[in-house]
Image: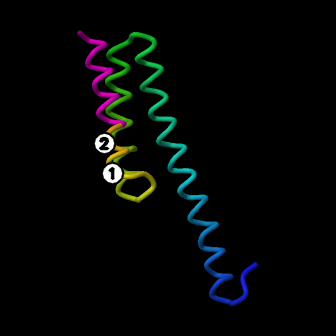
Amino acid sequence: MPNTRSAEKRVRKTARRTAVNKNRKSEIRTAVRKVEEAITGGDQKAATAALKAAEPQIMKGVSRGVIHKNTGSRKVSRLAARVKKLGA
């Protein structure tokens, strides 16, 4: 329970930020899932298109501080490698 007015405000701000970040993380997970579904389906064209859509989502999450820079880079790199492997 917050004791001061400033602490009450921090609680409100934290709740709003948490909701926004939760939504952004969900968007990232959805984009990644679409790429993975295309990969498991064996459709390289769809996988490439999904990766092109997912990469900006992931990097936007990085720039907004939702996920760490290395985590975002790792996700993009691993997805790109799997899509590339699909074509070979």
Q: Amino acid at mark 2?
A: Ser
Q: Nearer the viewer, residue 56 or 73?
A: 73
User: Residue 73: which disc?
Assistant: 2
Position of 46 with respect to 18 (left or right) is left
Q: Residue at x 36, y 44 (%)?
A: 72
Observer-nearest residue: 54 or 82? 82
Is residue 27 depicted above or below 83 in this figure? Answer: below
Q: Are marks 2 and 1 in contact (CB under 8 Å)?
A: yes
Q: Quadrant of residue 43?
A: top left
> Which quarter of the rendering shows the C terminus?
top left
In the rendered structure, the answer to whether residue 46 lies left or right of residue 1 reads left
Q: Position of residue 53 (x, y in %)?
A: 37, 35
Q: Is residue 4 rendered to the left or right of residue 55?
A: right
Residue shown at the point (37%, 19%) measured from the top left: 46
Q: Going by the image, does 74 lie left or right of 38?
A: left
In this rendering, is residue 49 above or below 14? above
Specify the label residue 54 is tagged with.
Answer: none
Q: Is residue 86 magenta?
A: yes
Label 1: which secondary element: helix
Which residue in the structure is indicated by mark 1?
69
Q: What predominant SS class does the magenta segment belong to?
A: helix
Q: Is residue 47 magenta?
A: no
Q: How many numbered marks does the figure carry? A: 2
Which residue range is magenta in the image?
75-88
Residue shown at 47% from the left, 27% from the top: 34
- Amino acid at circle 1: Lys
Give the position of the N terminus as an image quadrant: bottom right
